[in-house]
Structure formats: C-alpha cells, structure tokens
Image: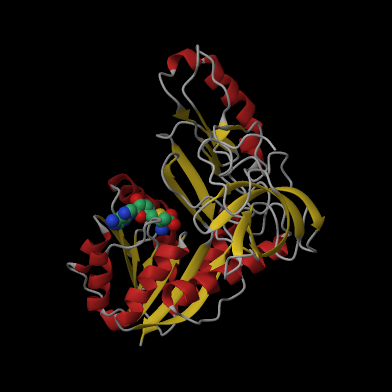
Amino acid sequence: MPRPPKKFHAHPFEYHQELELEIESLTNLGDGIARVPLPDHGEKWVVFVPFTLPGEKVRARIFRNDKNHSRADPLEVLEPSADRAQPGCPLFGECGGCQYQHLTYEAQLAWKTRQVGELLKHMAGIDHPVEPCHPSPRIWNYRSKITPHFAKPRNGVIDAIGFLPNARRSGQIDVPQCPIAMEEINAALPAVRDDARRRAKTFKRGATLLLRATEGRVETNPNAVATEHVGELSFDFLAGDFFQNNPYLLPDFTGYAAAEARKGNTRFLVDAYCGSGLFALTLAPHFEKVAGVEVSETSADWARRNAQQNGITNATFLAASAEAIFDGIEFPADQTAILIDPPRKGCSQEFIDQLIAFRPARVVYVSCNPATQVRDLALLQAGGFQLEKVQPFDLFPHTRHLECVMTLSRA
Ligand SMILES: C[S@@+](CC[C@H](N)C(=O)[O-])C[C@H]1O[C@@H](n2cnc3c(N)ncnc32)[C@H](O)[C@@H]1O
C-alpha cells in the first residue's frame, strides 16, 4: 500500500483499501452512494464513488475517510447498469464541467425528475408529484457561452486553459474542445487559447476568457453586444452578462411559463429578476400589461431596448432590487401573476414578505437552484400559497445542474 497523505484518518478503511461495492443511489453532485456493513457499527457506512451508477457493482479504492462516510475512486465496473452510456468527451471524469455523460440521456432525465421530488420531500416535507423533466432538443453542442480560465502564468507561460477539475483532483483541466458547447465556440476555441498564450506575459494573474456564440459567430469581448433569438423575438444584451445559455430549449421553457402564468385568467404579469427581459417580453403578448424589475441597470436598460426593437408596448422595466416593484404597483393583485427567476441564492426575505403581503393570484417560480427554490417555496406555502405544479427543464444536459419551474396559486 502506498503511504497515505499526512492528514489521512485510517478509520474505517486503510488508505487505498480496495472494496467491492454495490451502488444504491446518487448524490445531488452525481456521485454514486454505496452502503457497507461494518463489524462494530450499527448503521451501514456510506461510501461515495464518483462516476458510478445505481444498480452497479464496482471495485473502488478508498482515498478518504470522513466523520460519517468515506470516499473512493472507481477502479472497475464489475456489473454495469443498463443505463450506462459511452461518454462523449475524452475529458469526462477529469473535467468538473459534466457529471452525467456516463448515463443515457433518458436516465439523466429520470434522475433529475426524481431528484426534484426528493429535495421537496427531504428539505420541506412536501410530497408532490413532479412532471417528467422536459428534455433539451439538443444534448450536445447546446451551450451558447463558455468561460475557460487559467492560473497565473509561470515564467511567462500559461499552463492549462479550461475548467476546474472534478472534486477529487486539484489544479486546472486543459480543455481544447468542449462537446457541450456550440460548434462555433469549438471552432473559435483554438485561436482564443493561442491568443491568450501569446499574450501570457501581459497577465499578472490568472484570468477568465469569454466565448459567447451570437448569430453564428463568437464574441470574446464581454462589453460587446450579443444577440439571441427566441421564437420571433430577438434579444440584445452584453456578451458578458447573464442570458440563459441553452437557446434550443427557450421556446418551450418560456411557452410553459406563459401557460402557467396565464391560468386562472390573470391579466397582468410582474417579471421579478427579469434580466434583459426574456420572460417579460416572451410573455407580454399573453397579458394586458407587464412590469419587470432587475437590479442591474444595464440589463434593465437592455430589457427596455429589447421591448422597443420587438415592437412590444405593454411592458415597463424598473432598475431596482426586486422588492421595490411592490412600492407603487397598480395591478389588481387577484388578476396578477408574478414570475420570479432569481440568482442561485434565491429570493430575499424582504421580497418574499412583500410578495405574500401583495397576495397575487399566481406565482411562477423559475430557478436554477432547487435547494433555495424549495426553501422559498416553504415560506410561500406558509404565506398562503399552494403548490400546483412542478416541472423541471433540462437546460444543462450531461451536467448535474437542474432548472425547475414551480407554480403556486393563492390557497
Ligand atoms: C437567473 S437570472 C434571470 C434573468 C432573466 N429572467 C432571464 O431568464 O434572462 C437572475 C437575474 O436577477 C438579477 N438580480 C440579482 N439580484 C437581484 C435583486 N436583488 N433584485 C432584482 N434583480 C436581481 C441578476 O442581475 C440577473 O439578471
């Protein structure tokens, strides 16, 4: 056995001890979970093994014991799952970007659906059906933006340019091509990487590069204007600013939000955390009036311009923190739907309190972080809303990331 690292805690397994494990389930991070009986331990001991699948028998090698679980590297799949797939990227397993390329796409969708249901149950005690995760029309070459980075050049030389490695390894993974990014991004990537290497001496520290696909070409300047088309509408925004980065799914995604927001014959829409106006403007034709609110002044400004360039006249935008929208809102609450699409940290307590006090007919809560979404959902339920429908969308195939739309109505 090799010498363990200095801080290795040798209980219950030795360093590099090999085990045959049966994988029962997956964690939210996509690691396989096995449970091992120990002689003097009441409950079974949990061992996490990345890149393994439920139902598989694997040989794995321990590299860490924590307080109530251990971690192991997979060595060999002895009995593969029927859901196992051939990864589409040679860097899969090393690169931290994707977690599920070894899982068939159908199984990825089923797992994401189940995961939302489990989060609802375990975090908020809510037993609610979850609609099957809506697939992405494209599962490769779908990402419209990537941001590879590199560490501080050493002696004027840049080492790896790419993404963070998976949790086990340290440093940076060199990513010459990324098969989940659009074709035009992969076509531009070699030249962008070469250019950074040529300018290595000008970087005093590490840096992040931007490749944003826009209308068939790639923009690398974060302050340049990028354009995206969603159905009939076109959206301009700064290349470095937020825009949903799987454009292939956006017509279905916004169409679903529109149908959910319109139920109960609502006539007015508030789009909170509206960015450059994606939901406000795609939903505007379904409503008499729409009001958006967005903390970034430049994004709110783009939302106004996007309304104008698409000939939409029933939408106004406020540049302020989301809760400010409730200050002078003139829409009758019982005919208003509020769509929320906050950043990963979810809504502020202030926003939730004011939303509850406003008593809108419906809430359509869109989120890329189901953990904070479920936390906020519990607050909304306590505030008199009831959960109607839970619909995940697979904006991020092959990755562990989850996008979910939860619809609530006044109880
Ligand atoms: C997940 S993005 C959604 C943007 C938009 N709905 C879309 O789909 O393009 C979240 C947005 O919330 C904005 N934001 C963050 N904190 C905010 C706050 N306190 N009030 C209003 N907007 C905020 C961010 O600038 C960002 O544009």
Q: Nearer the viewer, residue 43 or 95?
A: 43
- State the quadrant of the N terminus: top right
Residue located farthest toward the front when viewing the structure as drawn: 40
Residue at 64% of width from left, 52% of height from top?
50
Q: Nearer the viewer, residue 285 or 153?
A: 153
Residue at 60% of width from left, 71% of height from top?
114
Is residue 262 left or right of 269 when viewed as pictured?
A: right
- State the quadrant of the C terminus: bottom left
- Quarter of the figure with residue 115: bottom right
Residue located farthest toward the bottom when viewing the structure as drawn: 411
Residue located farthest toward the left when viewing the structure as drawn: 328
Please, which colouring scheme is shown? secondary structure
- Residue 328 image position (x, y, % from top left): 17, 68
Residue at 45% of width from left, 60% of height from top?
369
Is residue 156 left or right of 189 when viewed as pictured?
A: left
- Quarter of the figure with residue 37: bottom right
Does the rendering let one see residue 86? no
Residue at 68% of width from left, 39% of height from top?
91
- Residue 193 image position (x, y, % from top left): 58, 25
- Residue 10 image position (x, y, % from top left): 57, 47
**Count the marks: how many?**
0
- Residue 290 image position (x, y, % from top left): 33, 67
The quarter of the picture showing ligand 1? bottom left
Q: Nearer the viewer, residue 177 or 280?
A: 177
| Vertical placement of residue 294 versus 358, above or below | above
Does the rendering let one see residue 170? yes
